[in-house]
Image (cartoon, rainbow, N blue to C red):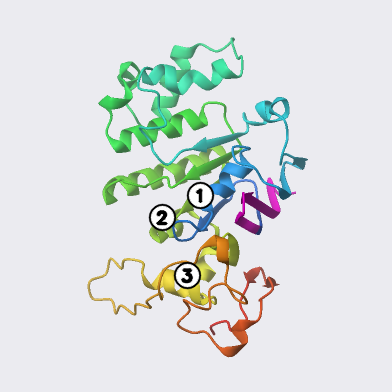
Amino acid sequence: MSLLNVVDLNTSYGAVNVLAGVSFSVEPGETYALVGESGSGKTTVIRAIAGLAPAQEGSVTFEGQEIRGAPEKVMRPLRKDMAMMFQDPVGSLSPRLTIRSLITEPYRIQGMKDRDLDTEAKRLLEMVNLPTHFADRYPYQLSGGQARRVGVARALALEPKLILADEPTAGLDVSVQGELLNLLNDLRERLGLAMVIITHNLSVVRHVADRMGILYLGRLVEEGTTETIFNEPRHPYTRCLLSANPEPDPDARLDRIALKGEPPSLLMRPSGCEFRERCPFSKEICTQTPEWEVNGGHGLRCLAPLS
């Protein structure tokens, strides 16, 4: 049984349909990445999973239990097994609390009075490779990379089974990104964690994700193993995103594919294939609406897929 199942998730704010039938699953110990441009609905997906954003339709099950729309009395105990890492590492930490208080706060929230908080703070700091004397510091005394590690420590406090990570490397230098990604990979292997990571940084995806889904205007347009999608992308939008990914080899041949214009308004979704007006490979058939099809574990929503 999958650890997390998201089926036909729909989220609207007034007349704006942000998510339109998003479905995916995450297995125990697996890292699943959601990729797309800003405004594609990535953050809304994980906020809906965590119960922090409304989802009007669809299903979200965690270990077989339906959690979409569940009341707080149901969600509170589940949050021991499901933790979030927020995009802004410093902004998500109260400036009035020490690092010790911040990373041990989950124990107080869950009423776990049997824990020695000093011991737990030391254990968590060591787990994310921070000196134990950082327990007495405040968030403003940390670098971006250190604050991100504190966020990881806080997320791991209750030994969750699933981490929901919103842009885990945003705003970090490349070298610090690498250190953090190596840490996340190491923790996943040691603790058997499953993770859902949302990002627009494809280098991050390639480094940590087992499988990935591509979001466009709140719909999944392609899904598969990370290796397959990087080597054989079939949706034109996926191909465009991959072509824009920085290449570290200075001698590599760059074959950029430019996207046309800006993403359309969610208030006026295009007819037919919603990507066709920006697609450099669009055909006459693309005026029809594509259906989601899965072949050999590779999901695709496209009437004129790339070979």
Q: Is residue 261 left or right of residue 302?
A: left
Q: Can you see residue 211?
A: yes
Give the residue at x 60% y 76%: 273
Give the residue at x 59% y 33%: 160
Q: Is residue 66 left or right of residue 244?
A: right
The residue segment tinted magenta is 1-20
The dot on residue 197 is: 1
Q: Can you see residue 214?
A: no
- Classify mark 2: helix, strand or loop: helix
Name the residue tied to disc 3. Answer: 230
What's under tag 3, amino acid-wise? Answer: Phe
Q: Is residue 12 found inside the magenta-colored segment of the image?
A: yes
Q: Is residue 236 left or right of residue 255?
A: right
User: Is label 3 or label 1 in front?
Assistant: 1
Name the residue tied to disc 2. Answer: 204
Q: Nearer the viewer, residue 117 or 101?
A: 101
The dot on residue 92 is: none
Q: Nearer the viewer, residue 287 or 118?
A: 287
What's under tag 1, amino acid-wise? Answer: Ile
Q: Residues within 10 Å of mark 3 (few under 14, many from 20)?
A: some
State how far apart marks 3 and 2 are (Cα). 12 Å
What's under tag 2, amino acid-wise? Answer: Val
